[in-house]
Image (spheres, rainbow, N blue to C red):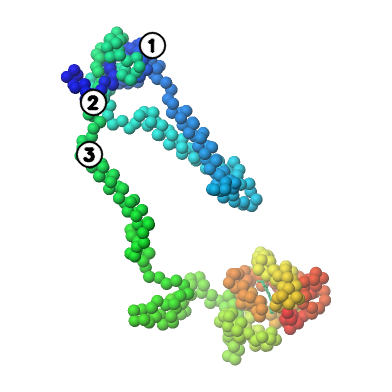
């Protein structure tokens, strides 16, 4: 010890060795009573009563964590209040969103975030506070240089009084320790050269820090620059594949010609291909046309219906409804419900529900053709503000007549529309369309009878609510 150069090391404290826990405790008590505070005891196992003996205070940590958590509570609430409800700040206003007239700020809604913030900051306070209070990280402890101290994990007990204690006095403290029964006393010195890392370590460290800074610097530099080369793509995924957007021209080949001769980028499905589950070959179920029906060659109209092409049908459709009816071969339509459709009460009720959803807007709930849309359109039409053909009444003689308007034809009206009525086949599945047909039939059986056979079409007036029926097609066409 003595030959060690005093300039290179600093005295940190005096380490006293004891042979048994009792003498350690009594020495600790004496030291405490003598007014020492900066001291610590080391033992191979926990010694009962050592904490009060060396005067260990309760840790400050819980209080610290509580303060941080408490502060976080207000910070969390405040942050949410500011972002959600503070619209008064002229410089950084929050977003005061009014949603369904709800208050901008309410406690229950903001508790989860507040709770999370409290938990997060408390966890950080605990972790960092523990490190701070223990003065961590500490890479070396001068005690470990004393060979005798190794027995602190084996069979000896130690008390160290540190020089930083205001009562510490090199010779006086030593004699006191002797008095209190120390078996041996040793100086604990901190080697001041200890802290100095080998120079190459520092060099490598510096170099490492410098290299680490390069990527961010490069990124920042590139952020403010334009470049002709494409971005660095670490994971290319499918970013560079060839693709054509919808509804654009076909890609052009190197020889200047379009890749697809029809000049479109979009391809049609292969002829005759049908999407899975959409092979609707059953003409009875899906078109309302009898299976064994063979179209007369001269009826273009009927053929068009058989192909179920509503657009062509519209184009071909004669303007005059009378002619349309003439051109149509009524015998093609199903007069009964197709196989697989069971008409029972549930089915008709389903039909009612669907009718009320899809049809009542125009045709009215009782099918008299005077739904709200119809009323409004008629009112507008009366001022010349709209062109509208009155929705037909389900009780109209022609609509009701099974020989002129068999089940299959009603089904077809729903599927493909008729004259000015639009098609609903895309919205309503075939099964439901049949259910609606059943309900229409039920409506016709039990439904209202028109009071008068008025030919007036102005349905906007209340007293005319039941008037939509009774006119021939031509009369209703007036718009
Ligand atoms: C947007 C309004 C509107 C909706 C919705 C509507 N229709 Fe029509 N419907 C009409 C109009 C208008 C006519 C008269 C068409 C014509 O003769 O030009 C009509 C005519 C009809 C006819 C008579 C066709 C014929 O043989 O002349 C039937 C049957 C019919 N609709 C059933 C229905 C059913 C069932 C629904 C529900 C799936 C429905 N409509 C939904 C407006 C509508």
Provide the residue designation for mark 2.
191
For label 1, the crowd category at 10 Å Cα-Cα, with few meaning under 14, some 14 to 19 and many 20 or more, is few
Callout 3 crowding tier (Cα within 10 Å): few <14, some 14–19, many ≥20: few
Task: Give 329 or 35, whichever is nearer the viewer.
Answer: 35
Q: Is residue 264 left or right of residue 389?
A: left
Residue wearing tag 1: 33
Q: Are marks 2 and 1 in contact (CB under 8 Å)?
A: no
Q: Give the residue drawn at x 40%, y 34%.
A: 127
Against 115, residue 148 (above or below) is above
Mark 2 or 1: the one toward you? 2
Q: Are marks 1 and 3 in contact (CB under 8 Å)?
A: no
Residue 466 percent location from the top left of the image: 79, 72
Q: CA distance from mark 1 to mark 3?
A: 47 Å
- Dot 2 or dot 1: first in sequence order is 1
- The mark that comes first in sequence, 2 or 3, is 2
Sequence-earlier tag: 1 or 3: 1
Label 3: which residue? Answer: 201
């Amino acid at each position: 010890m003595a030959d060690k150069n005093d300039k290179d090391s600093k005295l940190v404290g005096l380490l006293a060795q004891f042979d048994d826990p009792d003498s350690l405790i009594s020495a600790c008590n004496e030291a405490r009573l003598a007014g020492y505070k900066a001291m610590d005891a080391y033992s191979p196992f926990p010694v009962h009563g050592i904490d009060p003996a060396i005067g260990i205070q309760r840790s400050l940590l819980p209080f610290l964590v509580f303060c941080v958590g408490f502060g976080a509570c207000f910070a969390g609430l405040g942050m949410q209040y500011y972002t959600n409800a503070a619209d008064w700040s002229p410089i950084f206003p929050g977003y005061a969103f009014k949603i369904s007239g709800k208050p901008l700020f309410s406690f229950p809604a903001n508790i989860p975030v507040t709770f999370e913030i409290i938990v997060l900051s408390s966890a950080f306070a605990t972790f960092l506070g523990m490190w701070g209070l223990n003065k961590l990280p500490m890479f070396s402890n001068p005690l470990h240089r004393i060979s005798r101290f190794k027995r602190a994990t084996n069979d000896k007990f130690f008390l160290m009084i540190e020089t930083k204690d205001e009562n510490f006095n090199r010779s006086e403290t030593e004699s006191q320790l002797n008095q209190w029964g120390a078996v041996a006393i040793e100086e604990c010195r901190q080697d001041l050269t200890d802290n100095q890392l080998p120079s190459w370590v520092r060099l490598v460290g510096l170099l490492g820090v410098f290299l680490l800074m390069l990527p961010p610097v490069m990124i920042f530099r590139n952020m403010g620059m334009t470049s002709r080369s494409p971005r660095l793509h670490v994971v290319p995924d499918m970013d560079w594949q060839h693709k054509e957007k919808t509804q654009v021209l076909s890609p052009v080949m190197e020889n200047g010609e379009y890749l697809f001769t029809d000049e479109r980028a979009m391809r049609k499905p292969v002829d005759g291909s049908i999407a899975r589950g959409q092979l609707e070959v059953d003409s009875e179920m899906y078109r309302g046309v009898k299976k064994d029906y063979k179209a007369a060659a001269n009826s273009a109209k009927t053929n068009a219906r058989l192909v179920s092409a509503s657009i062509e049908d519209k184009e071909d459709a004669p303007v005059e409804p009378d002619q349309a009816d003439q051109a149509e071969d009524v015998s093609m339509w199903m007069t009964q419900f197709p196989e697989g459709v069971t008409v029972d009460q549930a089915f008709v009720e389903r039909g009612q529900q669907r009718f009320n959803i899809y049809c009542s807007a125009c045709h009215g709930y009782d099918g008299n053709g005077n739904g709200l849309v119809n009323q409004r359109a008629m009112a507008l039409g009366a001022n010349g503000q709209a062109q509208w053909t009155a929705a037909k009444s389900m009780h109209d003689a022609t609509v009701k007549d099974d020989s002129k308007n068999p089940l299959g034809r009603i089904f077809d009206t729903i599927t493909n529309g008729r004259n000015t009525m639009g098609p609903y086949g895309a919205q309503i599945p075939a099964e439901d369309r049949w259910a609606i047909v059943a309900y229409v039939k039920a409506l016709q059986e039990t439904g209202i009878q028109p009071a008068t056979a008025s030919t007036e079409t102005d349905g906007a007036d209340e007293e005319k609510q039941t008037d939509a029926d009774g006119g021939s097609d031509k009369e209703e066409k007036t718009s």
